[in-house]
Amino acid sequence: MNQPAAAPPEPQNLKDLEQLLYLMTKYEASDMHLKVHAPPIMRISGKVRSFDAPPFDADTLRRMVREILDPVQQREFDGAPPFDTKGPATDMDFAYSIPGVGRYRFNVFKQRGTYSVAVRRVNNVIPTMEKLNLPGDTLREISQYRDGLVVVCGVTGSGKSTTLAAMMEHINQNRRTHIVTIEDPIEFLYTDNKSFINQREIGLDCPDFERALKSVVRQDPDVILLGELRDAETFESALMASETGHLVFGTLHSSSVSQTMGRILELFPPERERSIRLSLRFNLRAVICQKILPSCAEGVGRVPCQEILIANPTVAKMIHEGKDKQLEGVIRGSKEEGMQDFNQSLMVLVQKGLITEEVALEASPNSEQLQMNLRGIFLGEDRGLVG
């Protein structure tokens, strides 16, 4: 989200693919894609960029992948014993590290008869809330909860994992707890501070979310981070863990607080709505919905815009009674409790010089209201709530 930090010095004698991995770290690319008849492609600050380099041919790309594999992985890649009954691999997942440079998560797959490669860079530097331009006071308070469920929402690429990482690192630096993360894949590597942290990656450390969730409460965690609340079973496991005294963080693909409530209920059959709402009444602690926006400030690439709901008694009662649409009014009127809607967040970002008015109006769910607010006009429940 911000200007890249100083890159580590390039090690000597790097293999061809390792040189590209070094460039990923140097330019703080989140992802890299390699395919035949195309140059290297990296995703930097959310934007896809092609390198000015010759395209790969099939033999070159295959050789580059094979030379970073260990002997067992090479046999799987080649379809050699004991993998010869299946033939050469069509999909492979593995992690790779370069000391002093970084750690990377690979998916090698076949398309149109040739290999392609998708690489995700695993971050080992956790950005602070201040560096990310997050509302630190509110998120730090949420991070101090001792139990309950916190849901961070947004579309793919909206920075959910980065926000969660900043919150986990705050806990790590300030509380003596045991944190267990279950991720697919691991996106940030934590170093134990006051807390001690175990990170489990689906496919490498445990076969699937179902088994990882069944065992996590037996691992004596205080805080549990789930990469994604992807289905009814995962969400129900998160609720059960929060009911038994754990602080649980998870993500959902939804764009607003009211939509999040609907998204949660869609995971379950209609006859379960009453019981799920009752559980949310007692266990939901906060919902954070996030968008990522281009910044106009020097040295800042992108900034998050957030809608934040804190589950106070009024909110809990509304959720239980199914009054989800009324939550928007509570959010707008509860700034003193740390809540904010998207327009309030956008106003703060404009006032701080982090985004332009044009960007704010384009991102606003109610641009007419925001335009009036930016001119100092506040009507009804908006009066005096922003600024």
Image: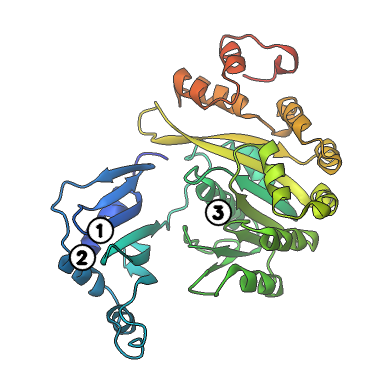
Q: Badge 1 is on which residue?
A: 35
Query: Quick one: which residue is furthest to the left in this view?
Result: 54
Nearest the viewer among 335 and 283 is 283
Residue 99 tag number: none
Above or below, 382 relative to 334: above
The C terminus: image quadrant = top right
Q: Badge 3 is on which residue?
A: 169
Marks 2 and 3 in Cβ contact (< 8 Å): no
Above or below, 17 relative to 79: above
In the rendered view, does 354 fall on the left or right side of 267?
A: left
> In 3D space, how far apart are the residues under numbered discs 1 and 2 (Cα atoms)?
8 Å
Q: Residues within 10 Å of mark 1 (few under 14, many from 20)?
A: many
- Say what secondary structure mark 2 lies in: helix
Q: Amino acid at mark 2?
A: Leu
User: How many labels, in total?
Assistant: 3
Q: Nearer the viewer, mark 2 or mark 3?
A: 2
- Say what secondary structure mark 1 lies in: strand
Q: Residue at x 23, y 64 (%)?
A: 17
In the rendered view, does 76 fall on the left or right side of 247?
A: left
Specify which label sits upstream in the sequence, 1 or 3: 1
Q: Badge 2 is on which residue?
A: 61
Q: Amino acid at mark 1?
A: Lys
Whether residue 250 appears in this view of the structure is: yes
The N terminus: image quadrant = top left
Specify which label sits upstream in the sequence, 2 or 3: 2
Q: Residue at x 68, y 49 (%)?
A: 150
Q: Residues within 10 Å of mark 2 (few under 14, many from 20)?
A: many
- Say what secondary structure mark 3 lies in: helix
